Image: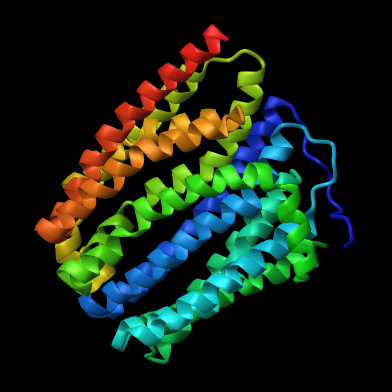
Amino acid sequence: MRPLKTQMEPTSRRGHIQRGAWGLVSQSASTAGNLATAIFVASTSSAAAFGAWSVGYAVALGVLTIVRAVCSTPLILDDAAGESRLIPERGAISSSWWLGSIAGVAVAASSLLTHGHLSQILLVFGISLPILMVQDSLRYLLFARRTPAPAAAMDVIWLVVTIAGFLVLSALHLTGGATATLVWTLGALVSCGYAAARGVIPSLLPSHALAYLRQQRWVSSRLLADSILNSISTQALPVVLALSGGLASAGALRAGQTLFGFIGVVVAGLTPVMTAEAVRDLRSGGSAWRLVLVWSLLLAFLGGLFGSILYTIPDSVGILALGASWAGAIALLLPLTVQAVLRGPLTGVPIVFRARLQLNRALGLRLMTAVPSLALPVVGAIGWQASGAAWGIAASALISSIMALIWLRVSEGREVSQ
C-alpha cells in the first residue's frame, strides 16, 4: 500500500480545533446524505412503504455500529494515545469489508422470510452493507492518520452524488426506498474511489482482516459488547413497532427522528473529536466532570432550541418534506425534544471511560442502561405504538442519564481509593 502523501497535522490546540472542524464537516455531510435519503423516500412513498425502509435502515445502522466498534474505533484510540506503531490500514478496511459482507448475506437472506416492500428493502440493504462498511472505515482511517480534510471530502462527495442521483430519479419519475438506497450506496462507492485516488487502497484479503482482528482483540472485544447493546437498544425499536403497530407506525417514529437529524450531526461529528480531546485532557489532569458537564449543557441547549424551531414549521412544508409520514412525526415532537435535552450524560460519560481506556466500566454502564433504554420504549411501543415508543425513549433518556452520572461518581471514588 502506498503511504498517504499528506502532511501530519500539528498536535497544538489549534490543530485539535482544525480537526474538530473537519470532523463536524465530515459528519454533517454524512448525516445530511442520510437525511436526504430518508426525506426522499418519505416524500415519495406511502407511510407503510417508508416504514419498511425504516426497518431496513435500522438494521443497516445496527450493523454499522457494531462493525465500527470492531474495526474503526480502535484506530482513533491508538492515534489519540500516541501509539507509535504503523496504523494497520489494510486490516481495518479488510475486516470492515468481510464483516459487512457476512452481515449483508444474512440481511439479504432474511428478505426471503418477508414479502412486499420489506422484502425488497432488506435485499437492497443486504447488497449495500459491504460498501457502506468500507466507506465508514476509510473515513475513520483518514482521521486516525490526522488527515481530516480528505475524510471530510469523502462525505461531501457522497452527499453531492446522492443528491444528484435523487434529482435524476425525480426527473425520471423513479421513486421508492429500494431505488433511493441504491443511489445512496452508489454515492458511498464513489467516495471510496476518491479515497483510493488519495493513496488509501482498500485491501479485501481475509488474511489482513484476521491479522488485524487478532491484533486489536483486547480493545475490539470490549467495544463489541457495548456496541451490540447500543445497537439493540437504539435500532430494535423500528422492528418492534413494525411487528406491533404496523409499518406505518415504524415510519412515523423514523420520520420524527429524521426531524432531529441535526442533533445527530452534532453528536456523531463531535464524539470522535471529544474522545481524542478527552484522552489528552484527562492525562494532563483534567476533570472528567467538567467534560461531561460541558457536553451535557451543549446537547441540552441544542436539543431545546431545535425542538422549538421544529414546532414552527407549517404543515404544508412538513408534508412536502415527509409526505404521508408528517402527521405521525409531528405528534412525536414533544417526547423527542425531551429526549434530546436529557441525553447528554448518557453519551458524555462513556466518552470519559473510552478516553481512559476503562472499557469494562463503559461496558458496565451500557449493561445497566440497556434495561431502561430497551424496555421502556418497547413497552410503550407495544401498548401505545409510536407515541408510546417516543415517550419511552424520553423516559429512558432521563433514567439512563441519572444512572450514568451515578456510575461516573462510583468510578471516580474507586480511582481515589486506589
* Residue nearest the observer in this picture, 9 or 224: 224
Seen in the image, is 8 located left or right of residue 218?
right
How many labels sit on residues? Answer: 0
- At a point 65% along the width and 56% down the height, the residue shown is 139
Q: Quadrant of residue 175?
A: bottom left
Task: Look at the image and tell me whether residue 332 can be seen.
Answer: no
Quadrant for the C terminus in the image: top right
Residue shown at 38%/46% (left/top)? 263
Quick one: which residue is furthest to the top in this view?
Answer: 417
Find residue 115 and report its horizontal and vertical position in percent.
31, 88
Q: Nearer the viewer, residue 35 or 227?
A: 227
From the viewer's perspective, is 264 left or right of 54?
right
Q: Position of residue 227 (x, y in %)?
A: 49, 49
In this rendering, is residue 383 above or below 11?
below
Q: Residue at x 39, y 87 (%)?
A: 112
Q: Name the spot of residue 86 as percent of width and height, x first.
A: 85, 46
Q: Quadrant of residue 364?
A: top left
Rendered image coloring scheme? rainbow
262 to 130, vertically: above or below: above
Q: Residue furthest bottom?
A: 172
Q: Quadrant of residue 398?
A: top left
Given the current orientation, which residue lies at the most extreme right position? 2
Give the image location of residue 209, x and y in percent: 74, 62
Q: Is residue 117 visible?
A: yes
* The N terminus sits in image quarter: bottom right
Residue beneath the point at 31% across and 34% down: 400
Which of the pair 39/231 is nearer the observer?
Answer: 231
